[in-house]
Image (cartoon, rainbow, N blue to C red):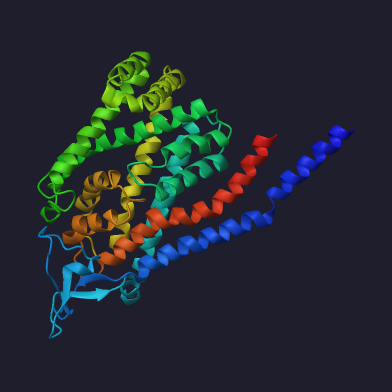
Amino acid sequence: MEQERSDAERESRFRDSLGLRRIIIPILLGIVGAGWLLYRDLMRPRFELASDHRGGYEWTDPNGDHLADLSDPGEFKRTADGSGDYKLVTARDVLRSVDWTWQSTLFILLALLATAIRDLGYMYRMRVLTDSSLNWRSSFNVVMLWEFASSLTPSVVGGSGIAMFIIDREGIPLGRSTAVVLVTAMLDEIFYIVTVPLVFVLVGMADLFPQQLDNAFWGLPIKTIFWLGYAFIVSMTVTVAYAIFFRPRAFKYLLLQVFRWRLLRRWRPAVIKVGDDIIIASKEFRGKHAGYWARSFGATCFSWASRFLVINFIAAAFFPVSDHLLLYARQLIMWVILLISPTPGSSGVAEIAFSGFFRDLIPALGFIGAVAILWRILSYYLYLFIGVITLPRWLRRTARSTAR
């Protein structure tokens, strides 16, 4: 009898700790925080080209990189007579000046649809990789919270480490969760490896690398950065795929031998875990039939193809796009820059890269800032808002499941 009373009290305390108030307050705080970040970006001053050459500012290029950083006031100076090729505006000013039409609205809705299709493809892939152990609701939570974590961490770190625990909390054992995350990343990289040669064939290489971005990132030509990044992606993907599907234990043994060296020994515990993850993934995925991999990779292509369409649709909302294929192809090149960005959600780097890659493809002066901020809203801020709403409710639901 006393044991039953103790269990009842424990259950009551558990329910109180997950009360509605404890969910609403974090949600409201999260929405306020994400809203402030969005408002800050909308109100942040930036420089745009002035069509009448009466913008009041001139670009001085103080660092000599031949690339105008439109968000850096230190690169511009006010003119005495009001002339100048640049004007000082905010993204909100530009959005307010847009002459919205039914066509503009249609293309913005198509951009939203492409974003939704992208996430739907990720959800379907998650169900395939887990053999439908995750239902659609759980897959939605995993994808949204994974994107939320990625938005809060540097791109070089990503949300993969957190994703393992998200999937684990949805009822998938941690070892299997690790394998799913590892293979998910591998499929993403395979899509990129396969798509880039197709782009070179369809578009050619002459117009893919904007010269104005040379030396803009880490003092290297943009083409050099791309090839270094692409080579790294290819080598890592081939290594992981070979280790998973052919020699997982030999791969772990090789890692351990390499990290026996004194200079590398401090990372040996982490390397041991990597080797264990590879072995787990091998046990999980070796022997899967061709249809399983076709559906997984098909969902990957579906998602990434939709992801890269978002900028095309946003640009088309403001002006006629003369070369949609080139606009689409340049996003593949830009993705390498964002992938190695050290800032959360590629913040800062994304804006500079966006301006450099698409300035010559966006003919409407002053609209590039509006296109960039709308793109950031759909690729970054959207997941901040969804994440802060989803996270407390998800923690409450999964905590109940764990407690049973």
Please give the name of the residue rendered at 34% of the width and 15% of the height, measured from the top-left corner: 253
Please give the name of the residue rendered at 10% of the width and 53% of the height, measured from the top-left corner: 211
Quadrant (top left/top right/bottom left/bottom right) for the C terminus = top right
Of residues 351 and 75, the one nearer the viewer is: 75
Picture quadrant where residue 7 is located: top right
Please give the name of the residue rendered at 57% of the width and 61% of the height, measured from the top-left corner: 28
Please give the name of the residue rendered at 29% of the width and 29% of the height, measured from the top-left corner: 237
Picture quadrant where residue 196 is located: top left
**Residue 110 appearing in the image:** no
Q: Position of residue 296 (x, y in %)?
A: 41, 32
Quadrant (top left/top right/bottom left/bottom right) for the N terminus = top right
Picture quadrant where residue 189 is located: top left
Extreme-front residue of the structure: 262
Using residue 233 as the reference point, say whether residue 35 is left or right of it. right
Using residue 120 as the reference point, say whether residue 237 is left or right of it. left
**Residue 59 appearing in the image:** yes
Q: Position of residue 205 (x, y in %)?
A: 12, 44
Q: Position of residue 29 (x, y in %)?
A: 54, 60
Query: Looking at the image, is 140 positioned above or below residue 386?
Result: above
Q: Position of residue 93 (x, y in %)?
A: 32, 75
> How many numbered discs, if any?
0
